[in-house]
Amino acid sequence: MITKRDFEVLADKLKSNRPLSNWSANKHVQWDQDVAVIADACARLNPGFKRAKFLAACGGLFSKEESK
């Protein structure tokens, strides 16, 4: 099972590669989709996964649609 520490490392790496606000909107959309898919996979791997906390640790989504 993936642990809290694994989620923290993954979120940190995603956050460090988050597109800057002056990048194209297409980059922001793609990043949101990628992070959402990764969050979905994490939720399947660990029933205690906290999606909102993970998304916040990634730097949040550009779309602001963080609940699913």
Image: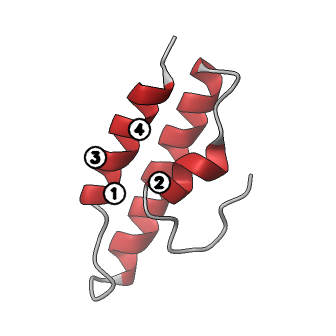
Residue 17: image quadrant is: bottom left
Q: What amino acid is found at the position of numbered circle 1 in the picture?
A: Lys
Q: What amino acid is found at the position of numbered circle 2 in the picture?
A: Ala
Where residue 6 appears, as percent x and y from the top left, is 40, 27
For marks 4 and 1, the one nearer the N-term is: 4
For marks 2 and 4, the one nearer the N-term is: 4
Where residue 2 appears, as percent x and y from the top left, is 48, 18
- The residue tagged 4 is 8
Do the numbered discs 3 and 2 sit on residues whose CB atoms are within 8 Å? no
Q: Determine the CA span between mark 2 and mark 4.
A: 8 Å
Do the numbered discs 2 and 4 sit on residues whose CB atoms are within 8 Å? yes
Q: As rendered, which of 26 and 46 lies closer to the eye?
A: 46
Mark 3 closeness class: few <14, some 14–19, many ≥20 residues within 10 Å: few
Structure colour scheme: secondary structure
- The residue tagged 3 is 13
- Judged from the image, the secondary structure of the residue bearing numbered disc 3 is helix
Mark 2 closeness class: few <14, some 14–19, many ≥20 residues within 10 Å: some
Do the numbered discs 1 and 3 sit on residues whose CB atoms are within 8 Å? yes
Residue 41: image quadrant is: top right
Q: What amino acid is found at the position of numbered circle 3 in the picture?
A: Lys
Marker disc for residue 53: none
- Please tell me whether residue 35 is drawn above or below residue 19 in the rendered image: above
Do the numbered discs 1 and 2 sit on residues whose CB atoms are within 8 Å? yes
Marker disc for residue 57: 2
Q: Determine the CA span between mark 3 and mark 2.
A: 10 Å
Instruction: Judge left or right: residue 46 versus residue 56.
Output: right
- The residue tagged 1 is 15
